[in-house]
Image: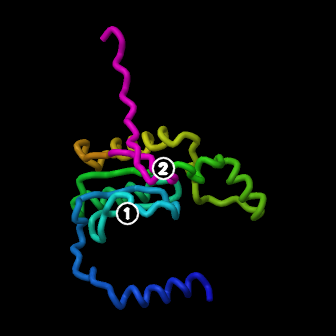
Amino acid sequence: MSVTDEVLKANETYAQYFNFGNLPLPPARKLAVVACMDARLIVSQILGLKAGDAHIIRNAGGIVTEDALRSLIISHHLLGTQEFIIINHTDCGMLTFKDEDLRSKLQKQTGTAAVAPVAFHAFSNLEENVRQQIQKVRSHPWLPKQISVRGFVYDVKTGRLREVVEARPTSARGA
């Protein structure tokens, strides 16, 4: 039996006891989360969320990509979210390679170049990556400046979140 067959069987059991069919479309906690797809992160449990509480947007690295921005804009403007959280984590696979190395490896393995993805968004510093993702959200003209955007690093060994303080611009000297 394949893993897909196993999870389909599990879905049959889940559906027998399913009782979330009447949840409203907007998330109850008015929260949207961008997090890494790493299987060790169970975002709802990490944040104490229940079904229907928040939008969870996941991808490799917890990157605010064009598609993640699209989702955040829809989440805010059409479904009323008022707070955004970005979660990266320790021991992330995105720390283990460089985009150009992976692209080269894939081209050698397949014998062809590809137009997508344009970038894999690998990074070498967790905290700096979280700051960059916060900045991508804050700088988008379709997202209000007053919306709360906070970033965290989740420790896969302890289960704890540590907030990443946003870098503050230095004031000009002599001004």
Q: Position of residue 5 (x, y in %)?
A: 56, 87
96 is higher (above) or lower (below) than 67: above
- Report the residue at 35% width, 41% height from top: 139
Q: Position of residue 143 (x, y in %)?
A: 28, 49
Q: Quadrant of residue 151?
A: top left
Judge left or right: residue 19 versus residue 164.
Answer: left
Based on the picture, tell me whether residue 158 belongs to the magenta stretch: yes
| Residue beneath disc 1 | 45
Identity of the residue furthest to the front in this view? 158
Residue 168 got which mark? none
Q: Count the marks: how many?
A: 2
Label 1 is placed on what type of residue? Answer: Gln
Based on the picture, tell me whether residue 61 belongs to the magenta stretch: no
Could you classify mark 2 by the number of other residues whose Cα lies within 10 Å: few (under 14), some (14-19), or many (20 or more)?
A: some
| Residue beneath disc 2 | 155
83 is higher (above) or lower (below) than 128: below
Q: Position of residue 165 (x, y in %)?
A: 38, 36
> How far apart, in angstroms, are the residues tagged by discs 2 and 1?
14 Å
> Which residue range is magenta in the image?
150-175
- Report the residue at 32% width, 85% height from top: 18
Q: Position of residue 12 (x, y in %)?
A: 43, 90
- Report the residue at 51% width, 61% height from top: 40
